Amino acid sequence: MIRHAWNIASIEWGWDLGDNPVEKIRLPKNNPPRERRLKPGEYERLKRASSETKVWYLWPIIEFAIETGMRRSEILSMKWEHIGIDNQRVLLPLTKNGSSRWVPLTKKALDILSQVPRNIDRVFPVTDVALRQSWERLRNRANLIDFTFHDLRHEAISRMFEKGLNVPEVASISGHKTASQLFRYVQVNARL
C-alpha cells in the first residue's frame, strides 16, 4: 500500500518525492495453493461421523458446499428470498469479491434445501462460530485432521470441471474474476 501511495503521489500527482524507498523491499512469495481433495472413502467417513452428531445442519451444509462450490460465509448468509426454486439458482447479493452472483442449484442441492426447515429468513440459521466448532468436532471424529471446510470448495470446483463444465462456466459459478485465481482451486482427477 505504501509503494502504491508513493507512486500515485509521485507519478500521477507530480509530487517531487525522489525514488520510492519501498521499491527495494522484496515482497513475500504467494502461498502455494492447497491441493487437498477428498480421497476415496473420506466422504463416507464424514457422512458416517455426521450421523453421530445432533447438529442437524452440519451434513446438509457440507453436501450443499460440495454441490455449489459456495464459501462457508455465502452458505450461512443465504436467505430463502434469494432462492429461485423454479429457475434453480440462488442469488448471492454480496460475495468476497464485492459483487453479486447467481449460483445454479443442482437437483441434489434442491433436494437438500427441500429438507431444511423454513423457520426464519436465513436458510441455515447458525453462526459462523457454531459451524466452525461443529466442523472441527466432525473432522476429528472422522479422523480428517488435514481437511478444512474450505477444501470442500476445492472439491466442488474440481468436480465441476470433471463433469465437463468449461472455465467461463465454472468461474461464473465460483465467482473467480480470473482464470489464474480459479486454477488455484482445481485438482482434476485425470482419467487416462
Image (tube, helix red, strand yellow):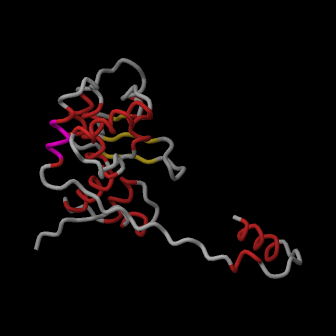
* Residue at screen point 26% across, 34% down: 60
In depth, the one of 80 and 151 nearer the eye is 151
Q: Reply yes or no: does residue 9 show up in magenta.
A: no
Q: Position of residue 9 (x, y in %)?
A: 81, 70
Q: Quadrant of the N terminus?
A: bottom right
Kindly indicate the quadrant of the structure image that contains residue 172: bottom left
Kindly indicate the quadrant of the structure image that contains residue 74: top left
Q: Reply yes or no: does residue 45 show up in magenta.
A: yes
Outermost residue toward the left?
192
Kindly indicate the quadrant of the structure image that contains residue 184: bottom left
Q: Position of residue 67 (x, y in %)?
A: 26, 46
* Residue at screen point 79% across, 73% down: 12
In depth, the one of 50 and 89 nearer the eye is 50
Q: Is residue 94 above or below residue 53?
A: below
* Residue at screen point 45% across, 66% down: 31
Q: Quadrant of the C terminus?
A: bottom left
Q: Main secondary structure of the magenta part?
A: helix
* Residue at screen point 12% across, 50% down: 41
Q: Position of residue 178 (x, y in %)?
A: 45, 66
Q: Is residue 16 above or below residue 98?
A: below
- For the record, the magenta segment spans 43-48
Q: Position of residue 118 (x, y in %)?
A: 33, 20
Q: Is residue 54 left or right of residue 40?
A: right
